Image: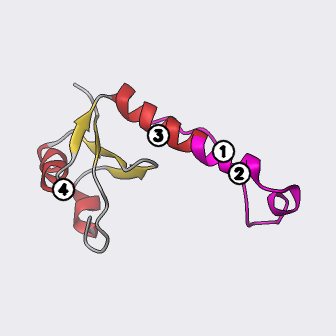
Amino acid sequence: MALFIYGTAINTGKNFFTAEDRRNFFLRSYPGNVWVVGNSEKGALWLADKNGVEKTKAEAQAIVTAEVTAAQAVYDALPEDQKNRPGFNQRPTAITLP
């Protein structure tokens, strides 16, 4: 059995997820409105309640990778003096979903 459910859902702000949600199941967000939740009844219900769309891991990874690649392109287009500001700009790094 898979450990995680992958999906997309738009974060609507305050109370989109709660501390109780975090205690009840694994919950982590990624670029592209991708959410990884624990493969449990509570996790599945949370994703459904948020009008989430379940994705395969490969589909979710493709969304995250596209977002990171786009962010890297934005960073790469910055003038050098803006790239080198300590603590301000760092080139986004690749993300591998669990």
Q: Which residue is pictured at 51% across the width and 43% down the height? A: 67
Q: Is residue 13 left or right of residue 89?
A: left
Question: What residue is disc 1 on?
Answer: 72
Badge 4 element: loop
Q: Is residue 16 left or right of residue 42?
A: right
Label 3 vs 1, first from the N-terminus: 3
Q: CA distance from mark 3 to mark 1?
A: 12 Å
Dots 4 and 2: beta carbons under 8 Å? no
Residue 12 on image: x %, y %: 28, 66
Q: Residues within 10 Å of mark 4 (few under 14, many from 20)?
A: some
Question: What residue is disc 3 on?
Answer: 64
Badge 3 element: helix
Q: Quadrant of the N terminus?
A: top left
Q: Magenta residues, as a range? A: 70-98
Give the residue type at disc 4.
Lys
Badge 2 element: helix
Q: Quadrant of the C terminus?
A: top left
Label 3 vs 4, first from the N-terminus: 4
Question: What residue is disc 2 on?
Answer: 75
Question: What residue is disc 4 on?
Answer: 50
Q: Is residue 58 left or right of residue 40?
A: right
Q: Nearer the viewer, mark 3 or mark 2?
A: 2
Label 3 vs 2, first from the N-terminus: 3
